[in-house]
Each structure stands twice: as structure tokens, then as C-alpha cells.
Image (cartoon, rainbow, N blue to C red):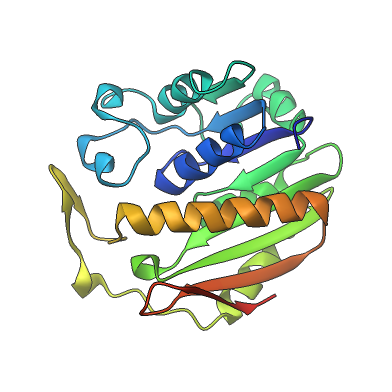
């Protein structure tokens, strides 16, 4: 795992938790791709602190991770996917493991259309409504199978999104899409990191659905 170059697409709460886990578990070469700026409301669940508010998420997260271990080299890439320049596209092709933490079908489609240049280990992580569960799709191929990933996700019996359940998550933050706690994100960050390591060791195409029971324990329903 140490020799793998890992790209994290999405530096939100889940991407932040996963990237920190990977760095502390031996990944030394990492890129973090995200175009957004950290807002004060993001502090409710994010690994970054108040000193990063107003700064680019990717750059701030990379700076924080570079201070965690002596041999870490994390680069923050302030950009969206797909890449807008040939130079950035070539840089993204240099990574061995591609981890999507955006929860966006549009990003999955763009990953399928992008020319990765060689076989990659792909992992897509998406938390369900209220962080009740975690959807994981893995593949080791030269192109990302977005259609299969989306179909597999849709076949899972996940709870529907309830916009009437939206609530205030933290100071200055109204987020009508995803109510969840920091504990939920840390838990799914740990589960997601484990699935990433498994995908690197035993590359195969599969979809898994992890669900949190009422007592806080986790069950795997598929895969």
C-alpha cells in the first residue's frame, strides 16, 4: 500500500476522514481534488478546524495531512473532475488508486469518460440518507464502469431521501441534503478505508452496502 499513489476526489467530510486514515496507515503519495472552499458550517463534521475556514478544502486538507507524518507527500488540487487542462489530466493519470467521495452520479459518468491511460483500482464511496449506510463500489479496470456502479447502487434497498427531515447542522450552516453527525462520518470513514485496502489487495468489481443498526453495530447486506 505504501507504494500506491492515491487520488481522493472530493474533500468533504467523508473524503477528509478517509484521506486521514490512509495517511496514518502508510499511504505517502496522495492527491486531493476538490474545487470548494471550507465554510464555517462544514466544521460540524469535517476533520479540518476553524483555521481552514475560507480556504480551499483540497489545499487545506493537504497541508494538514502533510503535518501528520514525516514522509507524507499530499498535494491539494483545487479543481473539479473532469480535469479542464491536459496538464492536470496527465497528473491524474499518474495515480494508481482512484477514490470517489463525492456521492455524485455526474462525477461517476465523468470518471467513465475520462482516459485513465492504464488499469486503476477504483473505489466509489457514498453515504446514504442520514448516514444510515455506506455504499461501496470497487473495480480494477482501465475504465470506470459507471453504468454498472449506478445500477448496483440503485438496486440496493437504501432509505429514501426525506427533504422534510432537513435541519440545522451547525453554526451558519443550513444543509437540506444530508443530516448526519461527526460520529457517523468517522464510522463510515473507517469502514470505507477498510474496503479501499481490500480493493487494493483483492481487486475485483463488486458493490457492497453497509448499514448501521439501531444499536450502533454495522451489518453488510450485499457483496
Q: Quadrant of residue 92?
A: top right
Q: Nearer the viewer, residue 103 or 61?
A: 61
Q: Nearer the viewer, residue 6 or 197?
A: 197
Q: Horizontal placement of 112 versus 174: left or right?
A: right
Q: Quadrant of residue 26?
A: top right
Q: Nearer the viewer, residue 134 or 184?
A: 184
Q: Quadrant of residue 69?
A: top right
The quadrant of the picture occupied by the N terminus is top right
Q: Horizontal placement of 102 versus 184: left or right?
A: right
Q: Position of residue 14 (x, y in %)?
A: 45, 48
Q: Horizontal placement of 201 versus 193: left or right?
A: right
Q: Position of residue 105 (x, y in %)?
A: 54, 59
Q: Horizontal placement of 138 versus 110: left or right?
A: right
Q: Position of residue 185 (x, y in %)?
A: 40, 54
Residue at point 44%, 23% (across, down): 64
Q: Is residue 152 visible?
A: yes
Residue at point 24%, 28% (across, down): 50
Q: Position of residue 216 (x, y in %)?
A: 39, 72
Residue at point 58%, 73% (across, down): 209
Number of on-image labels: 0
Height in image: 89 above or below 107?
above
Height in image: 160 above or below 62?
below
The quadrant of the picture occupied by the C terminus is bottom right
Residue at point 67%, 51% (across, down): 196
Q: Is residue 144 visible?
A: no
Amino acid at each position: 500500500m505504501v507504494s500506491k499513489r492515491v487520488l481522493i476526489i472530493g474533500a468533504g467530510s467523508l473524503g477528509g476522514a478517509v484521506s486521514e486514515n490512509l495517511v496514518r496507515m502508510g499511504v505517502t503519495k496522495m492527491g486531493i481534488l476538490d474545487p470548494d472552499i471550507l465554510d464555517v458550517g462544514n466544521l460540524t463534521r469535517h476533520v479540518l478546524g476553524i483555521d481552514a475556514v475560507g480556504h480551499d478544502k483540497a489545499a487545506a486538507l493537504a497541508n494538514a495531512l502533510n503535518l501528520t507524518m514525516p514522509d507524507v507527500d499530499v498535494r491539494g488540487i483545487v479543481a473539479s473532475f473532469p480535469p479542464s487542462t491536459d496538464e492536470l489530466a496527465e497528473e491524474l493519470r499518474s495515480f494508481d488508486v482512484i477514490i470517489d467521495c463525492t456521492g455524485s452520479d455526474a462525477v461517476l459518468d465523468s470518471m467513465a469518460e475520462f482516459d485513465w491511460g492504464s488499469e486503476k483500482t477504483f473505489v466509489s464511496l457514498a453515504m446514504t440518507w442520514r448516514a444510515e449506510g455506506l455504499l461501496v463500489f470497487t473495480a480494477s479496470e482501465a475504465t470506470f464502469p459507471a453504468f454498472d456502479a449506478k445500477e448496483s447502487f440503485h438496486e440496493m434497498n437504501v432509505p429514501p431521501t426525506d427533504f422534510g427531515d432537513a435541519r440545522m447542522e451547525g453554526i451558519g450552516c443550513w444543509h437540506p441534503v444530508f443530516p448526519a453527525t461527526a460520529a457517523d462520518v468517522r464510522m463510515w470513514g473507517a469502514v470505507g478505508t477498510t474496503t479501499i485496502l481490500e480493493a487494493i489487495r483483492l481487486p475485483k468489481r463488486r458493490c457492497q452496502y453497509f448499514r448501521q443498526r439501531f444499536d450502533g453495530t454495522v451489518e453488510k447486506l450485499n457483496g
